[in-house]
Image: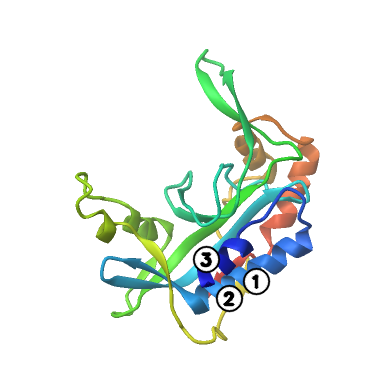
Amino acid sequence: MGNNNLFKLMTLDATMKTSDIEARFNQIAKKLFENFDIQKGNTTYLFKEIEFYFYNKNHRDIITHPRVSKPLYWYVNDFGGIDLNFSSSIESTNKFDDKGKIVQKFVLDDSAYFGGILIRQLIEKKSGKVLKGPLACAELFRSYDATGSNMKDDLPILVECDNGNAENIITKSRVNILRSNQIAEKKVDNILYAYSKYPEKEKLYKDFCDFIEKPYGYLR
Protein backbone atom coordinates (compact mmCIF):
# COMPACT_ATOMS: atom_id res chain seq x y z
CA MET A 1 0.00 0.00 0.00
CA GLY A 2 2.78 2.42 0.94
CA ASN A 3 4.72 1.53 -2.21
CA ASN A 4 1.67 2.27 -4.34
CA ASN A 5 1.24 5.66 -2.69
CA LEU A 6 4.91 6.51 -3.17
CA PHE A 7 4.72 5.34 -6.80
CA LYS A 8 1.87 7.79 -7.41
CA LEU A 9 3.73 10.63 -5.72
CA MET A 10 6.80 9.92 -7.87
CA THR A 11 4.72 9.99 -11.06
CA LEU A 12 5.26 13.55 -12.28
CA ASP A 13 4.62 14.70 -15.86
CA ALA A 14 5.34 17.29 -18.55
CA THR A 15 2.58 19.71 -17.56
CA MET A 16 2.83 19.96 -13.75
CA LYS A 17 3.25 23.46 -12.38
CA THR A 18 6.12 24.45 -10.10
CA SER A 19 3.87 24.81 -7.04
CA ASP A 20 2.55 21.27 -7.50
CA ILE A 21 6.04 19.87 -8.09
CA GLU A 22 7.39 21.49 -4.93
CA ALA A 23 4.41 20.21 -2.94
CA ARG A 24 5.27 16.70 -4.17
CA PHE A 25 8.90 17.17 -3.07
CA ASN A 26 7.72 17.92 0.47
CA GLN A 27 5.32 14.97 0.54
CA ILE A 28 7.89 12.53 -0.83
CA ALA A 29 10.67 13.67 1.52
CA LYS A 30 8.40 13.22 4.54
CA LYS A 31 7.36 9.77 3.36
CA LEU A 32 10.92 8.58 2.67
CA PHE A 33 12.16 9.74 6.07
CA GLU A 34 9.17 8.39 8.02
CA ASN A 35 8.04 5.30 6.13
CA PHE A 36 10.90 3.86 4.08
CA ASP A 37 14.40 2.42 4.48
CA ILE A 38 16.91 0.91 2.08
CA GLN A 39 17.68 -2.73 2.80
CA LYS A 40 20.68 -4.65 1.46
CA GLY A 41 20.88 -8.17 2.75
CA ASN A 42 20.50 -8.00 6.52
CA THR A 43 21.56 -4.35 6.75
CA THR A 44 19.03 -1.51 6.81
CA TYR A 45 19.71 2.17 6.13
CA LEU A 46 17.69 5.27 7.01
CA PHE A 47 17.57 8.25 4.68
CA LYS A 48 19.58 11.11 6.16
CA GLU A 49 20.03 13.61 3.31
CA ILE A 50 18.37 13.78 -0.08
CA GLU A 51 18.11 16.31 -2.92
CA PHE A 52 15.36 16.73 -5.52
CA TYR A 53 15.90 17.32 -9.23
CA PHE A 54 13.15 17.57 -11.84
CA TYR A 55 12.77 19.23 -15.24
CA ASN A 56 9.71 20.03 -17.28
CA LYS A 57 8.61 23.06 -19.32
CA ASN A 58 7.21 24.79 -16.22
CA HIS A 59 10.10 23.84 -13.91
CA ARG A 60 13.25 24.22 -15.98
CA ASP A 61 15.82 22.97 -13.49
CA ILE A 62 18.43 22.40 -16.20
CA ILE A 63 20.98 20.86 -13.79
CA THR A 64 18.80 17.70 -13.82
CA HIS A 65 20.28 14.78 -15.77
CA PRO A 66 18.09 13.58 -18.68
CA ARG A 67 16.81 10.01 -18.46
CA VAL A 68 13.96 7.70 -19.46
CA SER A 69 12.51 5.75 -16.55
CA LYS A 70 9.53 4.49 -14.63
CA PRO A 71 9.02 5.82 -11.07
CA LEU A 72 11.03 4.21 -8.25
CA TYR A 73 13.86 2.93 -10.43
CA TRP A 74 17.45 3.33 -9.26
CA TYR A 75 19.64 5.44 -11.56
CA VAL A 76 23.43 5.94 -11.62
CA ASN A 77 23.83 9.65 -12.37
CA ASP A 78 26.63 11.32 -14.34
CA PHE A 79 28.76 11.81 -11.23
CA GLY A 80 28.56 8.24 -9.95
CA GLY A 81 25.90 8.87 -7.31
CA ILE A 82 22.53 7.13 -7.03
CA ASP A 83 19.11 8.65 -7.74
CA LEU A 84 15.64 7.30 -7.09
CA ASN A 85 13.86 8.20 -10.31
CA PHE A 86 10.65 10.07 -10.97
CA SER A 87 8.64 9.06 -14.03
CA SER A 88 10.87 10.39 -16.82
CA SER A 89 10.54 10.73 -20.57
CA ILE A 90 12.63 12.54 -23.17
CA GLU A 91 13.24 11.93 -26.86
CA SER A 92 16.75 11.38 -28.19
CA THR A 93 18.49 11.35 -31.54
CA ASN A 94 21.88 10.34 -32.89
CA LYS A 95 24.20 13.09 -34.13
CA PHE A 96 27.77 13.35 -35.39
CA ASP A 97 30.08 15.22 -33.00
CA ASP A 98 33.06 17.40 -33.97
CA LYS A 99 35.22 14.30 -34.39
CA GLY A 100 32.75 12.53 -36.65
CA LYS A 101 31.66 10.10 -33.94
CA ILE A 102 27.97 9.25 -33.57
CA VAL A 103 26.66 10.34 -30.15
CA GLN A 104 23.24 10.31 -28.53
CA LYS A 105 21.69 13.74 -28.03
CA PHE A 106 18.48 14.49 -26.11
CA VAL A 107 15.64 16.69 -27.36
CA LEU A 108 14.70 19.24 -24.70
CA ASP A 109 11.26 20.29 -25.89
CA ASP A 110 7.95 20.91 -24.13
CA SER A 111 7.16 17.19 -23.97
CA ALA A 112 10.28 16.35 -21.93
CA TYR A 113 10.06 15.61 -18.21
CA PHE A 114 12.63 13.80 -16.08
CA GLY A 115 14.42 13.71 -12.76
CA GLY A 116 15.06 11.94 -9.51
CA ILE A 117 16.10 12.14 -5.88
CA LEU A 118 19.83 12.14 -5.21
CA ILE A 119 20.82 10.22 -2.08
CA ARG A 120 23.50 12.26 -0.30
CA GLN A 121 23.63 10.52 3.10
CA LEU A 122 22.34 7.32 4.71
CA ILE A 123 22.42 6.05 8.29
CA GLU A 124 23.02 2.38 9.04
CA LYS A 125 20.07 1.69 11.31
CA LYS A 126 21.72 -0.73 13.72
CA SER A 127 25.15 0.86 14.20
CA GLY A 128 24.32 4.51 13.52
CA LYS A 129 27.20 4.72 11.03
CA VAL A 130 26.67 7.49 8.48
CA LEU A 131 27.44 7.02 4.80
CA LYS A 132 28.46 10.55 3.84
CA GLY A 133 28.23 11.77 0.26
CA PRO A 134 26.70 10.41 -2.94
CA LEU A 135 29.70 8.20 -3.77
CA ALA A 136 29.64 6.50 -0.35
CA CYS A 137 25.91 5.82 -0.73
CA ALA A 138 26.47 4.50 -4.26
CA GLU A 139 28.80 1.81 -2.89
CA LEU A 140 25.67 -0.12 -1.88
CA PHE A 141 24.90 -0.54 -5.58
CA ARG A 142 28.26 -1.98 -6.64
CA SER A 143 29.91 -5.44 -6.61
CA TYR A 144 27.01 -7.74 -7.43
CA ASP A 145 27.48 -11.51 -7.59
CA ALA A 146 28.18 -12.21 -11.29
CA THR A 147 26.54 -15.64 -11.07
CA GLY A 148 23.26 -14.18 -9.81
CA SER A 149 23.06 -16.78 -7.04
CA ASN A 150 23.16 -14.14 -4.33
CA MET A 151 21.31 -11.38 -6.19
CA LYS A 152 18.52 -11.11 -3.63
CA ASP A 153 20.99 -10.21 -0.89
CA ASP A 154 23.10 -8.00 -3.17
CA LEU A 155 20.36 -5.77 -4.50
CA PRO A 156 19.37 -2.74 -2.39
CA ILE A 157 15.60 -2.36 -2.18
CA LEU A 158 13.14 0.10 -0.67
CA VAL A 159 11.26 -1.38 2.28
CA GLU A 160 8.35 0.01 4.24
CA CYS A 161 8.87 0.73 7.91
CA ASP A 162 7.75 3.00 10.72
CA ASN A 163 10.43 5.52 11.64
CA GLY A 164 8.07 7.78 13.56
CA ASN A 165 7.34 11.42 12.81
CA ALA A 166 10.29 13.13 11.13
CA GLU A 167 9.93 16.43 12.95
CA ASN A 168 13.64 17.20 12.76
CA ILE A 169 13.83 17.48 8.96
CA ILE A 170 15.33 20.74 7.70
CA THR A 171 15.21 22.06 4.15
CA LYS A 172 18.17 23.74 2.49
CA SER A 173 19.63 24.55 -0.89
CA ARG A 174 21.38 21.79 -2.82
CA VAL A 175 25.17 21.62 -2.72
CA ASN A 176 27.87 21.60 -5.41
CA ILE A 177 25.56 22.98 -8.10
CA LEU A 178 28.13 25.58 -9.11
CA ARG A 179 31.83 25.61 -8.27
CA SER A 180 33.20 28.78 -6.67
CA ASN A 181 35.27 29.61 -9.76
CA GLN A 182 32.55 28.75 -12.28
CA ILE A 183 30.03 31.10 -13.87
CA ALA A 184 26.43 30.06 -14.48
CA GLU A 185 26.56 30.60 -18.24
CA LYS A 186 29.55 28.31 -18.64
CA LYS A 187 27.91 25.62 -16.51
CA VAL A 188 24.73 25.74 -18.58
CA ASP A 189 26.71 25.66 -21.84
CA ASN A 190 28.43 22.47 -20.64
CA ILE A 191 25.07 20.90 -19.73
CA LEU A 192 23.54 21.76 -23.10
CA TYR A 193 26.18 19.73 -24.92
CA ALA A 194 23.98 16.70 -24.13
CA TYR A 195 21.07 18.14 -26.13
CA SER A 196 20.35 18.56 -29.84
CA LYS A 197 17.47 20.95 -29.16
CA TYR A 198 16.70 23.20 -26.18
CA PRO A 199 14.95 26.47 -25.19
CA GLU A 200 16.63 29.83 -25.64
CA LYS A 201 19.96 29.93 -23.79
CA GLU A 202 19.35 33.31 -22.14
CA LYS A 203 16.19 31.96 -20.51
CA LEU A 204 17.99 28.84 -19.33
CA TYR A 205 20.79 30.96 -17.83
CA LYS A 206 18.20 32.84 -15.79
CA ASP A 207 16.34 29.67 -14.81
CA PHE A 208 19.61 28.07 -13.67
CA CYS A 209 20.38 31.01 -11.36
CA ASP A 210 16.82 30.99 -9.99
CA PHE A 211 17.04 27.30 -9.07
CA ILE A 212 20.46 27.44 -7.37
CA GLU A 213 19.01 28.67 -4.08
CA LYS A 214 15.82 26.63 -4.13
CA PRO A 215 15.37 24.61 -0.88
CA TYR A 216 15.28 21.25 -2.62
CA GLY A 217 17.63 19.59 -0.14
CA TYR A 218 16.21 17.73 2.89
CA LEU A 219 18.33 16.75 5.90
CA ARG A 220 17.40 14.60 8.89
Secondary structure of the residue carrying tag 2 is: helix
Q: Give the mark nearer the N terminus: 1 vs 3.
A: 1
Measuring from the top left, give residue 215's x and y in whole percent: 66, 67
Q: Give the class, few, some or many, for how many residues have Cα within 10 Å of label 2's Cα (few <14, many ≥20).
A: some
Observer-side mark, 2 or 3, equals 2
Farthest residue, direction top: 100
> In the rendered view, does 86 fall on the left or right side of 152?
right
Residue found 75% across the figure and 43% down from its top:
204
Secondary structure of the residue carrying tag 3 is: strand
The circle on residue 30 is: 2
Q: Give the mark nearer the N terminus: 2 vs 3.
A: 2
Residue found 70% across the figure and 56% down from its top:
211
Asked if residue 68 is positioned above or below residue 27 in the image, the reply reads above
Of the residues shown, which amino acid type is indicated by label 2?
A: Lys
Of the residues shown, which amino acid type is indicated by label 1?
A: Asn
> In the rendered view, does 199 fall on the left or right side of 144?
right
Measuring from the top left, give residue 142's x and y in whole percent: 30, 51
Q: Nearer the viewer, residue 6 or 63?
A: 6
Q: Nearer the viewer, residue 200 or 159?
A: 159
Residue 51: name its quadrant.
Answer: bottom right
Distance of mark 2 from mark 3, alpha carbons? 11 Å
Of the residues shown, which amino acid type is indicated by label 3?
A: Ile
